[in-house]
Amino acid sequence: MQKNIIISGVGGQGILTMASIIDLAAMNLGLNVKQAEVHGMSQRGGAVESHLRISSEEIFSDLIPVGRADIILSIEPMESLRYLPFLSPYGVIVTATEPYINIGNYPDEKELLDTISASAKHVFVNAESLAKEAGSAKAYNVVMLGAASPYLDMPIEELEKAIEMLFSRKGEEMVKMNVKAFRLGLENAENKD
């Protein structure tokens, strides 16, 4: 088993929390994990990416080579296109449809989604409304993780167990909300080939 995942978005969207959940689930399964983060502008609003490599074999590099990512998991649609050169021909883009408009010349939203649609197999998620349904807009990232979970090649139960482990120190209500967000993402992702 080998899975190369690029998680992207902007600072403050929970990219590193998503990576931590996947890391924890993989380690609980006895898999090898390597992770590298790039914080373009490490304050809220700057580009953030995490390279996450999971394998049953030894991993020699924490960075994913161009053309080798199995998944681009993006919390922001324009950020998914930034990492398109890394996507393998068989890879999938899992992205939120809601933009984080932090620049003056942000592209037209429809054109942006059309470009993603034409670029690769993709999954679109209306993450904001699902996060609010789960109980908090802050659960946006966990909704996205749920949407990407079918492509991670890990049992759903292990990912939910990792969510419980990560959020348990914040109380039972926080755990329940995040598990609900994960399940809503899993159930509501719009898969397009």
Image (tube, helix red, strand yellow):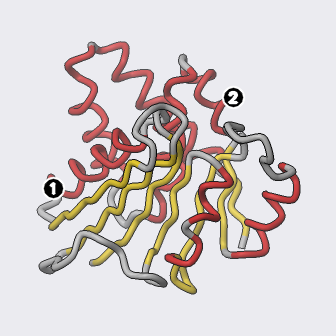
Is 132 on the left or on the right of 1, as rendered?
A: right
Q: State left or right for residue 110 relative to residue 148.
A: right
Find residue 101 and report its image quarter.
top right
* Image quadrant containing the N terminus: bottom left
The residue beneath circle 2 is 129
Q: Is residue 28 left or right of residue 119?
A: left
In percent of width and height, residue 143 lies at 53, 38
The residue sitting at 49% across, 28% down in the picture is 139
Q: Secondary structure at mark 2?
A: helix
Which residue is under mark 1? 27
Query: Mark 1 is on which residue type?
Result: Met
Residue 162 drawn at (x, y percent):
26, 41
Residue displayed at 78% across by 47% down: 106
Disc 2 marks a residue whose amino acid type is Ser
Q: Nearer the viewer, residue 181 or 109?
A: 109
Give the total number of marks visible in the rendering.
Answer: 2
**Marks 1/2: CA–CA distance:** 31 Å
The structure residue drawn at horizontal position 78% and vertical position 40%, both measured from the top left corner, is 104
Q: Secondary structure at mark 1?
A: helix
